[in-house]
Amino acid sequence: MATFGERIANFFGGNDTQTQEGLKNLFITELKDIYYAEKQAVDALGEQADASTTNEVRNAFLQHQEETRNQVARLEQVFSSIGVDVEEGSCDAIDGLIDDAQRSVSNTDSGSLTRDAGLIIAGQKIEHHEIAAYGSVATLARVLGYQQAVGLLEQTLAEEKNADKKLTTLAESFVNSRAAGESDDDSNQDAGSMVNPDGTRYDHPTGNVIG
Ligand SMILES: [Fe+2]
């Protein structure tokens, strides 16, 4: 089956000058928007790390903040590879997702694992937005024949998918089941141990859980 990019290229014939120009403008607009979004994400990831309860979640946000700084630099390479000045666009979606993350922090207790569960959920919503955005711009770059840009954008797309997967692993390994325990007001019991999905407990690897 033809890929989405091939279908776009086939649909438009690939040699319609007006369409090529339209797709190029769309690509540049989308590029500016994800550039803006990533710059907002760098700051938000720092705030999310500060708000985290456990070292595992904090480190996940800090590692991805570093990765995101590289992604910003990579986007600047994409701009330069197509001879366009680096410029920030706008993105209501990322603004809203970051607002949601801040609201989740306000609605949860500092030092609780419910806080970490909320941060992971908010973080994954942001990653899913970025995955959609990078998938789209990589497809447009391919259709437009910007091979260098395709390579750079696909590198970032893979990192975003990996960041999302890491958050899923974190959530599944301990946060959500332990947060359920907190709501039963048993957070002082077995301090330093965690709950497996099957309800059994195990020692927390770093013993840094505030409970
Ligand atoms: Fe990301």
Image: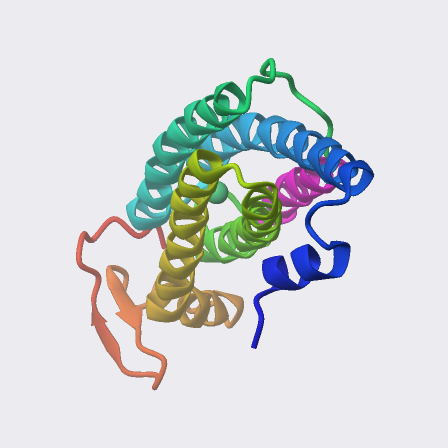
* 89 vs 107: above or below: above
Image quadrant where one finds the N terminus: bottom right
Query: Residue 35 lies in what quarter of the image?
Result: top right
Image quadrant where one finds the C terminus: bottom left
Report the magenta residues as a range: 92-108
Q: Nearer the viewer, residue 42 or 73?
A: 73
Q: Nearer the viewer, residue 185 or 158?
A: 158
Query: From this viewpoint, which residue is outermost toward the top?
Result: 85
- Residue at 68%, 45% (x, y): give it: 100
Query: From this viewpoint, which residue is outermost toward the bottom?
Result: 198
Q: Nearer the viewer, residue 190 or 20?
A: 20
Residue 160 in view (yes/no): yes
- Residue at 36%, 41% (x, y): give it: 58
- Residue at 40%, 61% (x, y): give it: 165
Report the side of 133 relative to 120 (left or right): right
Query: Residue 89 lies in what quarter of the image?
Result: top right
* 60 vs 120: above or below: above
Question: How far across and down, in percent of the image, does residue 146 sit?
Answer: 52, 36
Question: How far across and down, in percent of the image, does residue 33 sit?
Answer: 67, 31
